[in-house]
Amino acid sequence: MFGWEFPPHITGGLGTACYGMTKGLMKHDVEVLFVVPKAYGDEDQEAVRLINASDISIDFKDKKYEEYWQRITYMEIGSNLIPYVGPEEFRRIMEAKELESITSEDSVLSEKFEFSGKYGTDLMDEVKRYALIASAVAATSDFDVIHAHDWLTYAAGIAAKSVSGKPLVVHMHATEFDRSGENINQNVYDLERRGMEEADRVIAVSNMTRKIVIERYGIDPNKVFTAYNAVEPSDKPDQNYQRGVKDKVVTFLGRITFQKGPDYFVEAARKVLDKDPNVRFVMAGSGDMLNKIIKRVAELKMADRFHFTGFLKGDDVDHMFGLSDVFVMPSVSEPFGIVPLEAMRSNVPVVISRQSGVSEILVHALKIDFWDVDAMADSIYGLLHYEGLSKMFRRYGKEEVDNLKWENAAVKIKEVYESVL
Amino acid sequence: MRSICFYFQVHQPYRLRTYRFFDIGSNHHYYDEQQNRFIMRRVADKCYLPMNKLLLDLINEYGSAFKVSFSISGTALDQFEAYAPDVLDSYKALAATGNVEFIAETYGHALAALKSKEEFFEQVEMHKRKVEQHFGQLPTTFRNTELIYSDEIGAMVSEMGFKLMLTEGAKHVLGWKSPNYMYANAINPKLKLLLKNFRLSDDIAFRFSEQSWGEWPLTTEKFVDWLNDIDPKEEVVNLFMDYETFGEHQWPETGIFDFMRALPARVFSHSDFTFNTPSELAEKLQPVSSVHVPYPISWADEERDLTAWLGNELQDEAFDKLYSIKHKLDHCTDPDIIRDWRYLQTSDHFYYMCTKWFSDGDVHKYFNPYGTPYEAFINYMNVLSDFMIRVDEECQESSFQENLDQTIEKAAELGKVVKDKTVEIGKKVKKKVKDAKVNEMSLKDVASMSNAKIKELLRSVDVDELLVVLQDAGEDVRDRIIPNLGVRAKKKYEQLQGELKKVKKSDIKKYTANIEKELRNLFK
């Protein structure tokens, strides 16, 4: 399995999903060899054998690799592509990249590559080098199926397939359209499509994603399967977090970027506050739209009721849920969306956009169109004021999400494996 | 002759529009007029009009041999008036044949029987009046919303004066017993019960077009064979169903209209069954036993219970909140508020909140304008929140204030009346007492009279007579009168004392009577 990150070193949901998936697969007697660009040594290796790509040595005299290297050169990816990063951070990284590029050019020919293991600097170079390593792993390991997660690892997947002749499964956690709207990066799109074309099976995280894959990438529907993500039941005991305010709290948690729809959350907040001033809104996360959002909140004169926490992780996330009465995910485009499941796991009722993959499977959630600010405000108000609703969610929501275990979700993935063996 | 009893339920709710919480307190328009009109027109054209015509044709053809019964909810009647007067006319034409019985129910197709006896009674009364107004017959048969029934509900229905009620022949209630007899309420056996034969009813209503059903396609031949299979001792087959079965749930293409058109002929030619209305059966049949239904049943779903409308947190909160304001409406006279109060009680609103069908929702989705029970709940609660504010403002508070003013005013008025009356009665009593005393007055009473009165008396009597009488009067009387006599009279009195014995006893008596008469006059 080729991934880009693994807990605890994660920047997005991909690492968490991969971790849960490998654990789920293990329960069904699937052995996983997980390759990450950079292993830190403190990863949870209970479920997987983790291979640090940096530790793989490559003999460049081996002709195969040279061939591969030539084969993938045409997939050179525009260097200004950095996913999940805002413009300011981007500039910072680009500056850093100039410094690093001197050493990295040399390192291409060294025997062991250093990977940063993060999204960002030298990303495309890393994708290429990672692919090279992948073929080495493929040549020296024993396995039945290659499983590559997201476009960053597709080159690796293709390489491994060509080296080993084993079937390739690529996993679409997000498409370029989800990340960039209509202004897609053509290189990423091409790599995604290439990966799916070469693959024997494509796994999409929702029917919504599956549809994009079929319609916008022209992939044969017969080889595209939907396997929903899941969430691991919380192993932490329910904690009672002390509330500082008497007011009800409504939370947004995610990157503050266009595709997460934070602006709609702000507009809905104003509508709720017009009717009931005793509510507080919290926006947890960071991103390129943060400044714009802060400005809008001030413009709507609700800065005393609308709070920003910055990026939260780990226990802080649980703490935030512990204080929340409603969680809102107004995503404009969300291939899956695992955060609402985490909220429900903490007994927090959720309002989610219909433009999210998770809305396809959740029953005990209020679903709205991201642009329908009125409906969003109405749902929030209803959850805060009508006790019957929150009672229902307490009764069914947690139960529902506890059943969405990776152990169950992995069955579907195993079936996909079996279909190509 | 055994009977077939057709009963059709006709109902349309007032569906709510999307009502956001920011409408609360500012916008009091709750109904999705466009959708209600659209659905009413659609069902009118697909079901009500063609099926009413079909029934009218059958009645014209077979005369009194073919009869059916309807209950039409008040919300459906109101929507006929607003959107489909042609449908209302077609029902009136059916009513005019005399072969169609109209059955009473709650006006708003409500679940009031489960919560408020008072409201239940009011709504039934309202519905009866409405039926009488449109169809010229006052219902004597009752059926509750969704055939919901329990011993207690039956007892209430009996209390309202109905002789017969329709309900479900639920298996868990009947056990081995057949629904094809007349039964009676367990508390008040005067109330007769007709029970739905759910197998034969649902063969038409639900399974008619179901191609996976072993008996598909259902023909009149087959159906009449099944009727003939029934034990000849059994008296009545009750075929109760939604009227929308014809043309709306079962499309014309399924042959449902042809089936109904052909059924009577087949029944008459190949069986000993006739068609009767419920009230005819109430006259004709005697109960074979009572049925015990301690917990409410209905005609819905496999369970035949209330869980389609009540039981989950959403439904219970909405239902309890709704009826918590019942007492406030007792003083309400605002017609808009009363109307909304009835319309908001319609069982459909609670049906939309049911969570039973998260897994197998298809059958029910057809009837449900909401995507999920949660949306239905939020929308209803928003409307109800606004309604409760209106009730508080317009009924409760104002009527309380008005009440207070009125009470004070009334009390003051009453006080005045009471006071006047008291005074009047007091006077009368006093006078009576006085009169009684006066009539008993005698010369002796002079002893206790004031000097002024005595002088008045002296002026009105014959002094000579008085002086005679005085001779015989008691000393205390003399002592009171003599000092009040004039000088001349005193002298005369002294003269007379010597001649006393010459006065006749009868004269004294006569004079005394004269004086006492004057005395009494003095006090009258």
Image (tube, grey):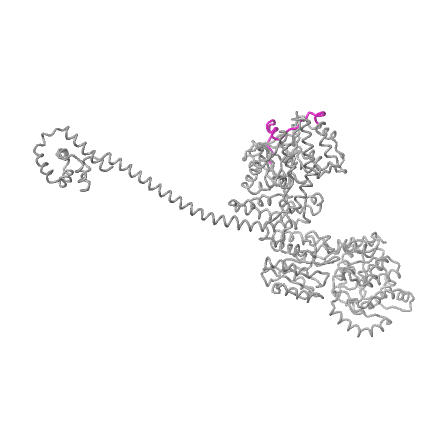
Res A190 → quadrant: bottom right
Residue B52: give x, y in percent of width and height. 67, 34
Quadrant where the image shows the N terminus of chain B: top right
Residue A381: give x, y in percent of width and height. 62, 55
Quadrant where the image shows the C terminus of chain B: top left
Membership of A43 in magenta stretch: no
Horizontal side of B164 relative to B496 (left or right) equals right
- In the picture shown, does residue A60 fall above or below B142? below
Horizontal side of A246 relative to A171 (left or right) equals left
- In the picture shown, does residue B167 fall above or below A191? above
- Front residue (pair B289, B278): B278
Residue B334: give x, y in percent of width and height. 54, 45
Residue B210: give x, y in percent of width and height. 75, 38
- Front residue (pair A323, A315): A323
Q: Which residues are magenta?
A: B267-292
- Front residue (pair B450, A164): B450
